[in-house]
Amino acid sequence: MDDVRLEAILHALSDPVRAAIFVEIAGAGCSQICSAFASVGDRVIPKSSLSQHFKALREAGLIRSERHGVEMRNTSRCSEVEERFPGLIPAILNAHARDIRRT
Amino acid sequence: MDDVRLEAILHALSDPVRAAIFVEIAGAGCSQICSAFASVGDRVIPKSSLSQHFKALREAGLIRSERHGVEMRNTSRCSEVEERFPGLIPAILNAHARDIRRT
DNA sequence: CCATTAGTTCCGAATTTTGGAACTATTGAA
DNA sequence: TTCAATAGTTCCAAAATTCGGAACTAATGG
């Protein structure tokens, strides 16, 4: 968590698909598996792209992924990021909610 | 300001050069001219790239540029963005200050 | 009107992102 | 065990984006 960079966080969340995935994971009480995001809205996301998106979120320090059997369970690392960058994630999640959807 | 998108803001600020420029403009009491950022840190930024960076910040709604004679004066639009996405810019500026510099 | 300063535009090269195909890992059944 | 099915990852070439030098435009002050 020490080498989590703001740059990486902003870059990760500047992509609409990754933002949607993160918002969902951060909002959910329990972990979400990758394939739950095979489509975002009406857009279908290829498996390989999904995998890359999760990798980006992971490397940005925003989520943690653990294998459970055949699937990967993803949980947000909000509280850890909060310690490093207080208020950042809440502000972005709030902004995301206020952002007019038109993609 | 209505069609300012979170995505564009995060993308604009996910670049280290643009982030440095914005932090400087947002922090300065008065407007800053583009050529003031001909170099960021010890890195030299070509004019054409600088121009593109300013364009990105402008289109994201983060700054306003006005020509004054031969130069462009850039001012931040923090208060306007604040109305649209409360707390976002302060949180990012704060995070930027906490981010360990190693680029 | 010319020289100078400040930015923009153009456009090819470098970099990053995308997504299909093939691969790996785990499990549950036969 | 072996096989089929499910869930992700890796590879790599095509598509999209970014970078930066050269030429261009705009404004000012001799």
Image (cartoon, coloured by chain):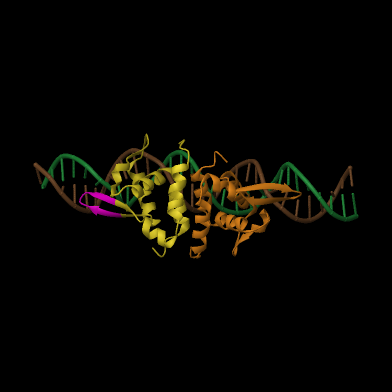
Chain colours: A orange, B yellow, C green, D brown
Residue found at the very far top of the displayed protein: B42
Left or right placement of residue B78 versus residue D2 in this view = left
Q: Is residue B85 left or right of B67 when viewed as pictured?
A: right
Q: Nearer the viewer, residue A79 or B99?
A: A79
The answer to if B67 sits in the magenta stretch is yes
The image shows residue B44, relative to residue A72, as above or below, that is: above
Q: Which residues are magenta?
A: B65-73
> From the viewer's perspective, is B14 left or right of D25?
right
Q: Residue B78: where, in percent of width, then height?
A: 37, 55
Question: Residue B8 in the image: x percent, y percent?
Answer: 45, 55
Percent of width and height locating residue B64: 32, 55
Expressed as whole percent of the image width and height from the top left, the position of residue A72 reads 70, 50
Q: Residue at x 53, y 49 (%)?
A: A12
Q: Residue D11 occupies which quadrant of the picture?
A: top right
Quadrant where the N terminus of chain A sits is top right
Does B35 sit above or below residue D25? Answer: above
In the image, residue A96 lies in the stretch drawn in magenta: no
Tally of numbered discs:
0
Q: Residue at x 59, y 49 (%)?
A: A79
What residue sits 66% from the left and 47% below the top? A65
- Residue nearest the observer in this picture, A14 or A52: A14
